[in-house]
Image (cartoon, grey):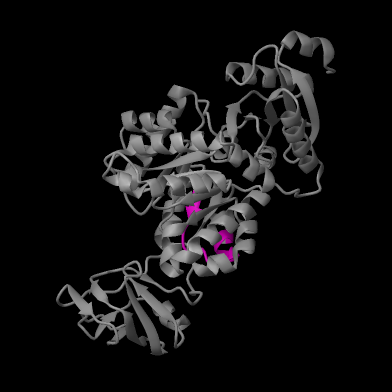
């Protein structure tokens, strides 16, 4: 299904979007990737959503990526005898391992690993940062704190620890079971929560064993500090602004977002900007102007994808939310300022033959009447390098592997086509011309750029660039075997 914009849209599925009719309507409205939130729903419910997505994909002959978002460790306080207490600024409050019900002076925090890492002066954030505690003294099983921001604390509220790297793996026992289950289903991407360092990613990669690509969620200050090594270890990145905005000053999030998006693009790895993009559309059919500007900003920055969470999972207007994102993206991408920003942020990266070929393909396409860049790719790397260039013409990614086409559905500008295996370059050029014509990207009198690698079907061998006609008779009469 051809899109009229390059940035991709990720839609989270949930109670508001779990039927075949709604999921198909979401894809037709513009959703390129469906997110399965492993924090909610049984394995049976997740499997049913997966089945429906693949049926929509088959019915519409359109590659769809499925992203399984692992829950990660959940840090929560225990329960209170009264259900809740009101903490006031300046009051003393203790966290400890005592499982007794809490009161106005203390509550259980059943996570010894937190106490292991705490130091005096560190901060603890409760209930999405609404309550802030500063550690005064601490030990192996307690932390005596002073309340710096008061509020209502109640049963099992979440705790964030922004100032220290916690000795916790990114994968809980639940995550490991979920990972094996969704890899068995055949999801395309795994989103990894609670990433603090590269070794968190390595564990997930080892367990996935190539069955799914690994996308790291940047939601903790430690992940920002260790971003370069995390990026190197990951196949993609999600800028999870919600948790970042809890653990860091909200004013720090926009420059972090911009910096991370640029680094991902330079590395030719897809990046999703997520959280609260159209939050008001959970209950309203129209977004706020500020939300529209937020979505537009992520697109202007060059993000590969923008994401809907509760808007499509539990909101009253899931299809309208996708349509809104699609409309904003379409409008932004025809803005001359967008073209200028994308071109200005392009930087030469890499010194391989493949890097040179994709850069040349983009330059040829933009300086002539080329209608599309068609790249044959086995692993997806050539398409990712082409997407890094952000060319002004469509990218058609041709691959014999359905899983490669699905993974590339997350990447900027990639129009994915599953094709037959090729063993001759002339056949590849003919296949590219047919894909360009049948997809409406070019007519018979137009020209395309074709990139490929010889020998075929060997990852990392991109070494040919050909400007080719879309008229097959001309290809057969002029192209070598």
Work out whether residue 29 or residue 402 is closer to the camera in this orientation and state it: 29
* Magenta highlight range: 189-202
Work out whether 370 lies above or below 352: above
> Quarter of the image containing the C terminus?
top right
The number of discs equals 0
Residue 125 drawn above or below residue 439: below
Residue at 50% x, 33% y is: 330
Vertical order, 465 against 65 (above or below): above
Residue 9 picture location, percent across and down: 47, 40
- Residue 40 location in percent, x, y? 32, 51
| Residue 392 horizontal/vertical position (percent) | 65, 33
In the image, taking residue 431 as reference, residue 139 lies left or right, namely left
In the displayed structure image, the side of residue 103 where residue 26 appears, left or right: right
Q: Residue at x 25, y 74 (%)?
A: 151
Nearer to me, 9 or 22: 9
Quarter of image, res 10: top left
**Could you tell me which residue is drawn at 45 percent across and 23 percent down?**
60
Q: From where the camera sits, is residue 44 visible? A: no
Q: Is residue 238 left or right of residue 309?
A: right
In the visual, does 223 lie left or right of 398?
Answer: left
Question: Is residue 259 in sight in this rendering?
Answer: yes
The answer to if 275 sits in the magenta stretch is no
């Amino acid at each position: 299904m051809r899109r009229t914009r390059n940035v991709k849209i990720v839609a989270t599925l949930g109670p508001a979007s779990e039927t075949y009719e709604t999921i198909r309507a979401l894809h037709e409205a513009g959703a390129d990737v469906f997110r399965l939130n492993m924090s909610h729903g049984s394995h049976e419910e997740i499997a049913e959503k997966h089945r429906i997505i693949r049926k929509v994909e088959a019915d519409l002959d359109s590659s769809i990526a499925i992203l399984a978002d692992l829950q990660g460790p959940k840090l929560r306080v225990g329960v209170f005898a009264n259900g809740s207490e009101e903490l006031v600024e300046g009051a003393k409050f203790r966290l400890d391992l005592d499982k007794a019900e809490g009161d106005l002076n203390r509550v259980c925090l059943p996570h010894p690993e937190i106490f292991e890492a705490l130091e005096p002066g560190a901060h603890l954030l409760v209930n999405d940062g609404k309550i802030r505690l500063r550690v005064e003294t601490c030990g192996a099983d307690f932390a005596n704190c002073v309340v710096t921001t008061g509020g209502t604390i109640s049963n099992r509220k979440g705790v964030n620890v922004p100032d220290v790297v916690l000795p916790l793996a990114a994968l809980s026992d639940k995550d490991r079971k979920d990972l094996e289950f969704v890899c068995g289903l055949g999801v395309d991407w795994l989103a990894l929560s609670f990433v603090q360092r590269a070794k968190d990613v390595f564990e997930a990669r080892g367990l996935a064993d190539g069955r799914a690509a690994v996308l790291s969620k940047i939601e903790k200050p430690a992940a920002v500090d260790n971003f370069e090594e995390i990026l190197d270890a990951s196949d993609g990145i999600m800028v999870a602004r919600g948790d970042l905005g809890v653990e860091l000053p909200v004013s720090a999030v926009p420059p972090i977002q911009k910096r991370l998006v640029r680094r991902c693009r330079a590395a030719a790895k897809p990046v999703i900007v997520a959280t609260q993009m159209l939050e008001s559309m959970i209950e309203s059919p129209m977004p706020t102007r500020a939300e529209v500007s937020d979505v537009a900003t992520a697109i202007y920055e060059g993000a590969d994808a923008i994401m809907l969470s509760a808007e499509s999972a539990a909101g009253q207007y899931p299809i309208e939310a996708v349509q809104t994102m699609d409309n904003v993206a379409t409008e932004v991408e025809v803005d001359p300022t967008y073209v200028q920003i994308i071109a200005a942020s392009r930087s030469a990266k890499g010194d391989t033959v493949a890097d040179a070929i994709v850069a040349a393909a983009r330059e040829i396409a933009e300086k002539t009447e080329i209608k599309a860049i068609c790249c044959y790719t086995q692993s997806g790397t050539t398409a990712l390098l082409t997407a890094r260039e952000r060319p002004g013409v469509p990218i058609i990614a041709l691959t014999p592997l359905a899983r490669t086409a699905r993974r590339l559905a997350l990447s900027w500008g990639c129009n994915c086509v599953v094709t037959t295996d090729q063993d001759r370059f002339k056949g590849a050029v003919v296949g590219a011309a047919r894909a360009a014509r049948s997809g409406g990207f070019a007519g018979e009198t137009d020209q395309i750029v074709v990139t490929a690698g010889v020998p075929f079907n060997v990852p990392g061998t991109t070494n040919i660039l050909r400007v080719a006609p879309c008229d097959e008779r001309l290809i057969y009469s002029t192209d070598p075997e």
